[in-house]
Image (cartoon, coloured by chain):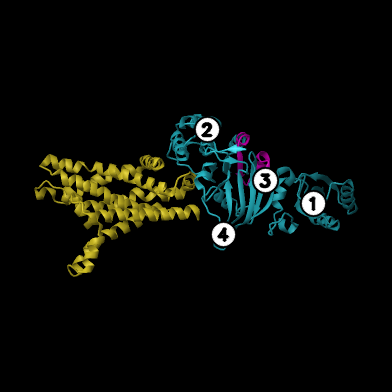
Chain colours: A cyan, B yellow
Amino acid sequence: MMSTREGAHIEQPVVQAEGLVRSYGEIRALREVSFSIPAGSVVGFLGPNGAGKTTAIKVLTGSLAADQGCARICGYDVEAQAQEARASIGYLPENNPLYPEMRVDRFLRFSWQAQQVEGASEDCGQAIERVVEATGLSSVYRRAIGDCSKGYRQRVGLAQALLRDPPLLILDEPTNGLDPLQVVEIRELIRRLGRTKTVLLTTHVLSEVEALADRVLLIHQGRKVADDTLETLTSAGDGRLVQISVQAKPERLESVLRTLRLEIVQLRPSVFGLEESARGLVRVTSFTGEQLVSISRAVQEAGLPLLELAPHAGGLEALFQSLDTAGGVSVSTEAQA
Amino acid sequence: MRRVLLLARRECASAFDSPIAYVVLATLPVLTALFFFVLGGFFAGGTADLRAFFALLPLVLILIAPAITMRMWAEERRSGTEELLFSYPFRVCELVLGKWLGAVALLALALLATALVPLTVFWLGPLDWGPVIGGYLGALLLGGACLAAGLFLSAVTANQIVAWLLGVLLLAALNLPSLLLPFVPVSSGAARVLLAVDQRERFQGLARGVLAFGDLVYFVGFTALFLCLMGLVLENRRFR
């Protein structure tokens, strides 16, 4: 059980969205999206461009109203109790908008005062000291934000989100545009924050979700298409994935796999540096030895030199690629093209 | 109120972090002094009064007020910091009043810089300070109204130049009606309407040190109208 500053006891999830619908004219950005995020989770919020992620986040942060449905943050309705709901969120918007002319220390002071509520356990100085230490900003503390590197600006954005020590952090593309070293630093920071806070993280970088999140919320064309633990999702949903590589043209591998009536998730040419070669990713119902043997035998009978036959963990990339236009998670090779 | 003052302070500080504050603080005194001493024929008149100075002020404010407000919302919107502000627990009325007070504070500083004009006149001859103080208070009322209109226009566009141009056009239109008086019958209803809506005519009463209830209602009402319109725009953008 959690307690808020106002004394409201919270047993419910930190985020609860029920039947969110939101349209922009004819375009339906969210279609009956429901999900909940329990306290202490690090949730990766995934979806292709235009899937509805940013709209959902704007609804949660109270900067956009849903046409239907409701959302609660720490039990507070984001519309009816907007002040309380906002006070429970630390938000890093996409592209990390900041005031470049302001100094880091002055911006953090402004940000703390803007977010301050009565009864806060820390004063401004203590809160700033805490976030500066947590985000490693001491070396640029008195520098103008516009003069800081992009990595440090991202830290400033994270620092302002942490000032109130909120139970929920919403980070929209937190590593967008950073160089690899900065990405590693920010990921490590988010990982540390995730130990004590609930984090909702949107990103296009699937490896980031795999590295940081313990739960994935997948949205496509305004609909929720997956909401589960990373482990369950990457084990390929309704079946398992097998990776098979042969020294032959992709069309020949495809015809063999089709005779076995296997669903082809992915088919790529040229593997292992061989010009005439192909790698397929197929979905099988289970990893029985017989199934692998039958694939191996069919390939050999077709006269295709086998280069590789192994269970494939799938990963988020395969799941992401498997999104079809109907919003499901099954695909054909045509969808890959 | 705490958050209103916080935002007002940030707006003021932000103006000084950019060239806007310095341009305004330099332009207003220079323009008013130039018009008053050089073009206004002060030395030819031979009397120590500031009526011509206050008569010019509304015209100068047509250019200056939109310059102060043009970036206040347009830049927030363009750079995305508007979303950050909206995510903080500000009420819309706090955002509206905070921005407006910040703009008024900057204008007040610029008006203070024009005090060189009355001080020079005082140095040259006897000056009745009553109408001067009344004139400055009236200028603040007028300026507050112009800034409210400018802020509303800044809130409806993401382009600072467009916001400035729209502001200049609107304020110019509000200062023009009395110029149409020669074309309507004297004492007609149309003449009364033209005088009633003309900002410059309204201000002249205040500039003489006469605080008429009608003028006060006009400026306060004008300010409140545009602040409310700005609030509606922000409310609409924040939630729609």
Q: How many marks?
A: 4
Is A224 drawn above or below residue A86 in the view shown?
Answer: below
Specify which label sits upstream in the sequence, 1 or 4: 4
Asked if disc 3 and disc 4 are in contact, CB closer than 8 Å, the reply is no
Q: Residue at x 74, y 56 (%)?
A: A331
Q: CA distance from mark 1 to mark 4?
A: 37 Å
Specify which label sits upstream in the sequence, 4 or 2: 4
| Residues indicated by labels 4 and 2 sit on the same polypeptide chain | yes
The residue that label 2 is drawn on is: A131
Query: Hey, what amino acid is under mark 3?
Result: Val
Q: Residue extending furthest left? A: B46
Determine whether the residue tagged by mark 4 lies in a helix, strand or loop.
strand
Specify which label sits upstream in the sequence, 2 or 1: 2
| Residues indicated by labels 2 and 1 sit on the same polypeptide chain | yes
Asked if disc 3 and disc 1 are in contact, CB closer than 8 Å, the reply is no
The residue that label 4 is drawn on is: A23
Query: Hey, what amino acid is under mark 4?
Result: Ser
Asked if disc 4 and disc 2 are in contact, CB closer than 8 Å, the reply is no
Q: Magenta part of the protein: which range? A: A190-214
Q: CA distance from mark 3 to mark 1?
A: 23 Å
